[in-house]
Image (cartoon, rainbow, N blue to C red):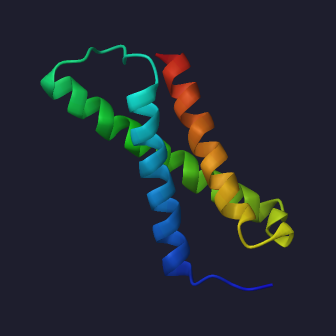
Amino acid sequence: MRVIDPAIAFLLVLLIGIVAGLIFERTARPAWFGRDGINDRRALVTCALIGIAGSFIGYHLTLLLGLFRMGVLAPFIGAMLFAILALWLWRLAR
């Protein structure tokens, strides 16, 4: 099994979370706090941060469960899935 450099893994998980948050915010229904100038930017930042948190949780949970043996991409797939899950749960908790 190939090992990914921790700095590269960190940047990839960060990027996965940001992209997931931005895509989710643009494709999901309007945020509960409105769609005007400042609140629109605040919604983008909030979704990006929630996506980052979910991606880091998913990445590390995948590693803890030992799913990394399935391939080098498994932790990043877990990061993407947990980022989406975290964003969906955040939207439900509003």
Q: Residue at x 69, y 53 (%)?
A: 78
Residue at the farthest front position: 27
Q: Position of residue 14 (x, y in %)?
A: 46, 60
> In the rendered image of this protein, does residue 50 appear above or below residue 32?
below
> In the rendered image of this protein, does residue 79 appear above or below residue 4?
above
Q: Position of residue 5 (x, y in %)?
A: 57, 84
State which quadrant residue 56 falls in.
bottom right
Horizontal arrangement in the rendering, residue 78 relative to residue 71 (left or right): left
Q: Residue at x 61, y 50 (%)?
A: 80
Question: Who is closer to the viewer here, 24 or 43?
Answer: 24
Q: Which quadrant is the N terminus positioned in? A: bottom right
Horizontal arrangement in the rendering, residue 11 relative to residue 43 (left or right): right
Question: Who is closer to the viewer here, 6 or 26?
Answer: 26
> In the rendered image of this protein, does residue 51 appear above or below residue 38?
below
Q: Position of residue 38 (x, y in %)?
A: 15, 27
Q: Residue at x 31, y 30 (%)?
A: 43
> In the rendered image of this protein, does residue 89 appear above or below residue 32?
below
State which quadrant residue 26 falls in.
top left
